Amino acid sequence: MITEQFISTSVTPLESLDILSPHEVAKLQDKSNSGLYRLFRQCSLAVLNTGSEMDSASQVLDRFKDFDIHIKHKHKGVQLELINAPATAFVEGELIQGIREHLFTVLRDLLYVGDELDLCCDTDDISERTTNTVFHILRHADAMKPHVKPNMVVCWGGHSIKRPEYQYTKKVGYELGLRRLNICTGCGPGAMKGPMKGATIAHSKQRVLNPRYVGLTEPGIIAAESPNPIVNELITLPDIEKRLEAFVRLGHGIIVFPGGAGTAEEILYMLGILLHPRNKDIPFPLIFTGPEGSGAYFETVDKFIRETIGENATKRYEIIVDDPHQVAVRMREGLDLVLAHRKETDESFHYNWQLFIPPEFQLPFEPTHEAMATLNLKRGQEDYILAAQLRRALSGIVAGNVKEPGVEAIRKHGPFELTGDKDIMASLDHLLESFVDQHRMKINHEEYVPCYKVVR
């Protein structure tokens, strides 16, 4: 039996955030419900636990229950005191530099979102306010690079994938890197790490200066999907909806690898937006891909999309199996169309203002048992609205699988119940059963117990 090792030490920022106000320090130390201490501790632990095979926030917190973090504002600047931190975050007693960077970017984002965003957007329009909020967060993190031609490829996919699928994501990342394209993912393991790993080799071969590996996360998921070590720009959004919007505002095209409920949620989010009438002429390359043997996965996903939100949705994506080179070629062609469109319409290269995102995709969804049971999973509504409802259903399943509040709610009250039209429920049930059968719900496959019940 391996004994867990811990380290207690003090760390300071390398470049930024060396000055905080007494008010900010007090918020980070505040253990009340209105304070940031609990959230900061959880996110910090996730960063320090990089490389872990656990994908449950509650398991991480239980394993490191003696971990603590204190913040001090000394005359030389900010200092964090780490108590019983995972020893894997250190080399010969010194905190790994990339992990130190991530630790202070989490601090940066939590403070900025908490202190300033309520004042940044003086409008009652929900869509406009949310879009401006995401813009302010990304700008504060220095994530937008003006005057650079579209080159940011978002890669979505599961954290729980098989070895051949992981190797394939690296090959695709390599092909993208050879074309000098940057990578943005959800920052975790699996299909979020692979493309970055492949791209690092290609960027090195092409002598790309300052390659970008952007990781977008949110407090509810970060402990379950700790940032992978390749991420050199970590940004923490306040909730899953703003995280998803950040992907499509910052990215110029999306590649989807095999995954589980979270990946299906992302697919429905993107398709729902692209299906809105206001977005019909906006180019946004969307490619589903995986290695040989993953064809059945995409057939299942494609069938689900056709049976629920309709055939029209299939026109907004293409499926390429076992051809990393072709994936990169098609993405490069798609980005050329994006560049031409943005030049023609005087749209910025660094932030996709033109894309309209309906409020149904922006309002935070709290997956309680009541909220999940009352989702409108029925015909008779516009296809993008149904996509939004299905997206929320899958978001709730992700929460029940790995997010601390969702896991606790399932423990107390049993599985979420989903109801709707019989044919939609049958398609959803088939999709979810395929994820379970293919071990795509959690990293620890043997322990998975469904957190949902589809009522037909």
Image (cartoon, rainbow, N blue to C red):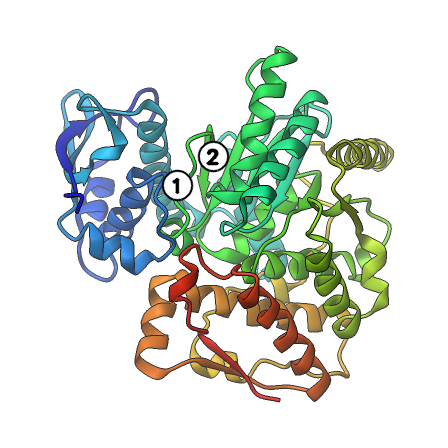
The amino acid type of the residue labelled 1 equals Asp
In this view, the residue in front, 274 or 434, is: 434
- Give the left or right position of residue 135, taking residue 315 as reference: left
Point out which mark residue 310 bears.
Answer: none
Nearer the observer, 161 or 132:
161
Residue at the spot x=43%, y=80% of the render?
A: 415
Residue 359: quarter of image:
bottom right
- Which residue corresponds to mark 1? 109
Point out the tag, 1 or 2, that comes first from the N-terminus.
1
Query: Depth check: 140 or 119 in front?
Result: 140
Please state which of the two labelled residues, at mark 1 or mark 2, is closer to the viewer: 1
Circle 2: residue type: His
Front one among 300 and 65: 300
Could you tell me residue 76's position as x and y percent? 17, 20
Tell me where residue 26 appears, x and y as whole percent. 18, 45
- SS of the residue at dot 2? helix
**Above or below: residue 391 compared with residue 417:** above
Residue 400 to residue 259: above or below: below
Q: In which quarter of the image is the C terminus?
A: bottom right
> What is the x, y in percent for residue 23?
22, 42
Which residue: 49% across, 46% down? 120
Q: Is residue 365 visible?
A: no
Asked whether the beta carbons under mark 1 and mark 2 sit within 8 Å of each other, the answer is: yes
Which quadrant of the figure has residue 276? bottom right
The residue under the point 19% across, 39% down is: 85
Q: Mark 2 points at which residue?
A: 140
- Residue 9 picture quarter: top left
Q: Is mark 1 on a helix, strand or loop?
A: helix
Q: Residue at x 53, y 48 (%)?
A: 133
